[in-house]
Image (cartoon, grey):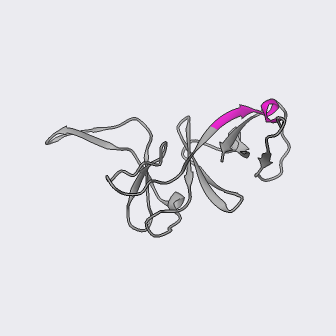
Amino acid sequence: MRVVVAPLSDFPAGSRRIVKVTSREIGVFRVDDSFYAVRNRCPHQGAELCLGHLRQKLISDAPGVVTVDDGAPLIVCPWHGWQWDAATGQAYAPGDPRVRSYGVSVEAGAELVKPEGEEVRMVAETFSVSIEDDYVVLYA
């Protein structure tokens, strides 16, 4: 299922949207020109995970040597600080449960024509757009 989240022009870098898809809430994040989407539920105790902070990973190959990873950020649970990779849903701590991650793309309005057999849900406020506008689309 493809779910239209918002026009790209209404989704600035550093922002997030939480969308409801059937019975699930999914957080969609824009970090610079990259998009990430994860289920809005911490597997630890059910917190609204997507209300937490995003943090870049720190990597250390030797004592006293720390670098900042330029890959996908970590989503930090607002209740207890548990962390997950925003791109994969993999827990940062070994053995912790993962969270569900979803694909996100930016598509031209012309590409949002409903393909045969596929549902496209317009989960967004009503607004006027032209067919050339780009949209952030969640694959749930």
In the displayed orientation, state which residue is furthest to the left. 63
Q: Residue at horizontal 39%, vertical 35%?
A: 70
Total number of numbered labels?
0
Q: Is 90 included in the stretch rendered in magenta? A: no
Q: Nearer the viewer, residue 108 or 85?
A: 85
Q: Residue at horizontal 49%, vertical 42%?
A: 87
Picture quarter with the N terminus: top right
Q: Position of residue 82 (x, y in %)?
A: 38, 60
In the rendered structure, the answer to whether residue 89 lies left or right of residue 18 reads left
Q: Residue at horizontal 83%, vertical 39%?
A: 129
Q: Position of residue 45 (x, y in %)?
A: 46, 70
> Which residues lie in the magenta part?
105-113
In the rendered structure, the answer to whether residue 56 lies left or right of residue 25 reads left
Q: Residue at horizontal 44%, vertical 61%?
A: 77
Q: Position of residue 20 (x, y in %)?
A: 69, 58
**Rendered view: 124 above or below 129:** below
Q: Nearer the viewer, residue 118 or 2?
A: 118
Q: Quadrant of residue 4?
A: top right
**Rendered view: 52 above or below 34:** below
Q: Position of residue 29 (x, y in %)?
A: 56, 47
Q: Quadrant of residue 56?
A: top left
Q: Quadrant of residue 97?
A: bottom left
**Rendered view: 117 above or below 80:** above
In the rendered structure, the answer to whether residue 61 lies left or right of residue 57 reads left
